[in-house]
Amino acid sequence: MVHRILIVTAVAAEADSVSAGLDLSGPDGPEHLPLPGGFALRRHTGGSVRADVLVGGVGPAAVAAATGTALAAASLKDADSGYDLVVSAGIAGGFPPVAPLGTVVVSGAVVAADLGAETPDGYLTVEELGFGRSSHPVAESLTGRIAAALAAGGLAHTVGPVLTVSTVTGTAGRAAALAERHPGAAAEAMEGFGVAEAAAAYGVPVVEVRAVSNAVGPRDRAAWRIGEALDALRRAFALLSRTDLVEPS
C-alpha cells in the first residue's frame, strides 16, 4: 500500500529544504505537477511513500486556499489519489526555553493563537464565544513516531503546541501574553492552522513540523539563524522520509 502525504510550506526556500531531505526520488528529482490556481506539486515517490510538496503562500488564508486546492484536486481523481496525512512544514519562532534555536518542533496541537476576541476581562477564544474552533489536536501516536525518528537521528526536538498568528510577535510583552494564554507553547508561525482547517474539511489527519530560526519576542535580526533552521528542516525530513508516518489501519 502506498501512503500519500501532502507537505505544505509557506515559501519556496522551505519547500527546497523539505525536498532536499526527502530520500524518495530517483536521479531526475521530483515530478512537477500543475494544480488549478497556479499552484504546483513536487511529487517525490519511492517505496511505499508518495510525498507531494506544495508552496502554499504566507499566512493562514493563503495556505488554506492552496491546501484546499491540492486536496480537492486529489479527491476528484480515483479513490487511490487522496492523501493519508497532511504536514505543515517550515521554519518558525521558538518560545524559549521550550524550543531553542535549531530545535525541530512537532505540534502536539495546531492552535490559532489570535482567533477570538479581546474583552475587558481578558482574551476569549472562538470556542468561548460560542462559534468555531481554534485548535486541532494531533494524535500522540503520530507525534510519538515523529519524535522517535528525530531522536534516533540525533536531532534536537520537542513536542508542544504550535501557534498560528497573522502578525508575527515582535515584543516581549506579546510573547509573554501568548505563552501565558497557551501553556507549553513551543513555536509560533503563520500557516499551520490554515493547513489544518483545510485538512479537517477533507477528514485527513494533520501535523506541523517546524525548525526554530529565532526566539519569539523582540525582533533581533542579527540573532536569526534562518540558514541553520532550513538545514535542520532538511535533516528532519531526511529522517522522516524513512519513517512510517501514517496511522496503521
Image (cartoon, rainbow, N blue to C red):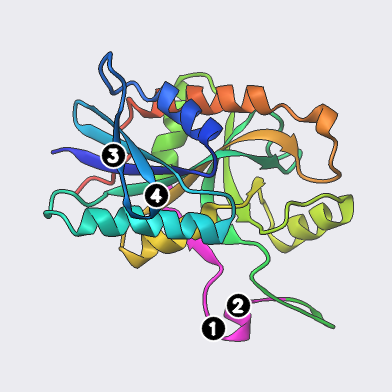
Q: Residue at x 54, y 83 (%)?
A: 131
The Cα atoms of the two marked residues, 1 and 4, are separated by 33 Å
Q: Who comes first in sequence, dot 4 or dot 3? A: 3
Say which mark, if any, is on residue 131: 1
| Residue that label 4 marks | 38
Q: Residue at x 53, y 29 (%)?
A: 233
Q: Please, is residue 117 above or below residue 86 in the view?
A: below
Q: Residues within 10 Å of mark 2 (few under 14, many from 20)?
A: some
In the image, is 79 to the left or to the right of 220?
left
Type of amino acid at the residue the image marks with label 2: Val
In the image, is 194 to the left or to the right of 53?
right
The Cα atoms of the two marked residues, 2 and 3, are separated by 37 Å
Type of amino acid at the residue the image marks with label 3: Leu
The Cα atoms of the two marked residues, 2 and 1, are separated by 6 Å
| Residue that label 3 marks | 33
Q: Residue at x 55, y 31 (%)?
A: 13
Viewer-side label of 4, 3: 4
CB of mark 2 within 8 Å of CB of mark 3?
no
Q: Which residues are magenta?
A: 124-141
